[in-house]
Image (spheres, rainbow, N blue to C red):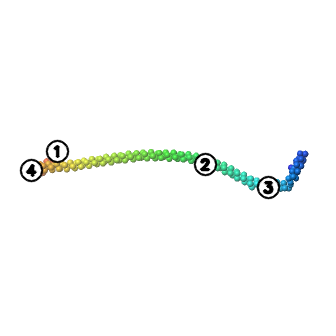
Amino acid sequence: MILLPILAAQGGIVDNLVDSAQRTGETFGFNAWMFFSQIISFGIVAFLLQKFAYKPVLTVLEQRRQKIAEGLANAEKIKQQLAESEKRYQEILSKANADAQRMIDEARSSAQALTDKKTQQAISEAEQIIAKAREATLVERERVFTELKREVGRLVINTTAKVTGKVLSNDDQKRLSDEATREVAAA
């Protein structure tokens, strides 16, 4: 309604437009009170939609945008942390490999030292056994030799007594025994 007086002031064109608008309104049943009530209803609905629908939707969209931005930032942080973790993993793995290699080398050297020690110990024990065997052989030889001397001396005395047919005195027996021992020792 406010627009019509402004247009009426414009002159003839305005009059034609006004007449045209009135005829259209009359043809379609234009009712000014109904039109204003619809404008007021539309304004109320637009206000309510603005207040209770449009702003909350914008708020939700803004929150989603922030969450997406935070998610991207967190994804970037996680990517950096993953790279750092991978780097630490590689460092730990290389250190563990180095430690393992060092332990293997130490075990090898320790095993070699132990082998050398056991070999030396076995050689020493073998030499001791050989020395004891030689000593036992010498003792046994002396014992057998002494027994042999006695036996040879006894045999010489018995043989001489039988050949001569007389009983030998202790001095004769000792002399013959000493001579037989010297001859056995010389042989």
Residue at 70% x, 51% y is: 61
| Residue denoted by label 4 | 165
| Residue extending furthest toward the left | 165
Pick the front one: 48 or 77:
48
Residue at 16% x, 45% y is: 183
| Residue extending furthest toward the top | 186
Q: Earlier in the sequence, mark 1 or mark 3?
A: 3
Q: Earlier in the sequence, mark 1 or mark 2?
A: 2
Q: Are marks 1 and 4 in contact (CB under 8 Å)?
A: no
Q: Earlier in the sequence, mark 1 or mark 4?
A: 4
Q: CA distance from mark 2 to mark 4?
A: 125 Å
Q: Secondary structure at mark 3?
A: helix
| Residue denoted by label 1 | 183
Q: Secondary structure at mark 2?
A: helix
The answer to whether residue 22 is left or right of residue 81 is right
| Residue denoted by label 3 | 44
Pick the front one: 103 or 37:
37
Return the x and y of residue 3 as percentages of the image width and height. 86, 49
Q: CA distance from mark 3 to mark 4?
A: 171 Å
Callout 2, which amino acid?
Ile
Q: Earlier in the sequence, mark 3 or mark 4?
A: 3
Residue at 26% x, 49% y is: 136
Q: Is residue 136 visible?
A: yes
Q: Earlier in the sequence, mark 3 or mark 2?
A: 3
Q: CA distance from mark 1 to mark 3?
A: 154 Å
Q: Are marks 2 and 4 in contact (CB under 8 Å)?
A: no
